[in-house]
Image (spheres, grey):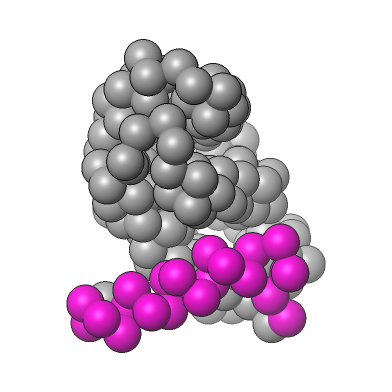
């Protein structure tokens, strides 16, 4: 069960990475304040990041983050850092969504700030995923109890990814369609 839960979290990371790739690409390709389609796609992608990993994926990991330092004190600093990043990402996503609204209202500076913010955000997300997979998950596999894993497993089974899961939510259909066409065009897995 432990390895199945970690594999599921890693699979979710691959999907998150696809969305991050789209976010970075779309921000770089923005055609200025009048790029309605670009802003719509960015809004959907950032909304997904805010409402799926931020609200449902991260809480599974946060069970690990809360329990590990109690069992293995050497993990405390890393767990605090990862938990702080979860909060920082939520704040960045909200800020980027505000920048999109400002850019759509005609503010070219907001568009430029959005591009800068997206680059840093995507870079930090990539480092974050690497830390979780190379440090957090191995420690969790080694130190967490079977009861902890049962709680994480029950929490993760209750999660349905609104883009990559069964029954895509209508709100994310254009994001899914774009990601699937991008995947086919560029051979992204």
Q: Main secondary structure of the magenta part?
A: helix
Q: Is residue 16 left or right of residue 113?
A: right
* Residue 175 locus on image (x, y percent): 53, 64
Front position in the image: 63 or 54: 54
Front position in the image: 105 or 58: 105
* Residue 121 locus on image (x, y percent): 35, 33
Residue shown at 36% from the left, 14% from the top: 109
Residue shown at 64% from the left, 64% from the top: 172
- Quadrant holding the C terminus: bottom left
Say which quarter of the image contains residue 74.
Answer: top left
Say which quarter of the image contains residue 157.
Answer: bottom right
- Quadrant holding the N terminus: bottom right
Count of numbered labels shown in the rendering: 0
Q: Is residue 183 left or right of residue 55?
A: left
Front position in the image: 42 or 79: 42
Q: Is residue 76 left or right of residue 162?
A: left
Residue 9 versus residue 92 in the image, above or below = below
Range drawn in magenta? 167-187
Residue shown at 42% from the left, 31% from the top: 33
Which residue is farthest left?
186
Residue 59 versus residue 141 in the image, above or below = above
Front position in the image: 141 or 118: 118
Q: Is residue 119 magenta?
A: no
């Amino acid at each position: 069960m432990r390895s199945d839960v970690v594999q599921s979290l890693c699979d979710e990371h691959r999907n998150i990475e696809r969305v991050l790739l789209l976010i970075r690409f779309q921000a770089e390709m923005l055609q200025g304040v009048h790029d309605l389609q670009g802003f719509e796609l960015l809004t959907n992608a950032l909304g997904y990041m805010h409402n799926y990993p931020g609200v449902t994926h991260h809480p599974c990991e946060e069970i690990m983050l809360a329990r590990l330092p109690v069992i293995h004190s050497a993990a405390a600093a890393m767990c605090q850092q990862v938990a702080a990043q979860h909060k920082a990402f939520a704040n960045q996503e909200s800020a980027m969504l505000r920048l999109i609204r400002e850019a759509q209202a005609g503010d070219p500076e907001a568009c430029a700030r959005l591009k800068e913010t997206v680059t840093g955000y995507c870079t930090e997300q990539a480092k974050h995923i690497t830390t979780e997979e190379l440090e957090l998950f191995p420690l969790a596999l080694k130190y967490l109890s079977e009861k902890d894993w049962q709680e994480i497993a029950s929490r993760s089974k209750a999660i349905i990814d609104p883009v990559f899961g069964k029954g895509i939510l209508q709100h994310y259909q254009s994001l899914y369609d774009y990601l699937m066409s991008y995947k086919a065009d560029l051979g992204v897995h």
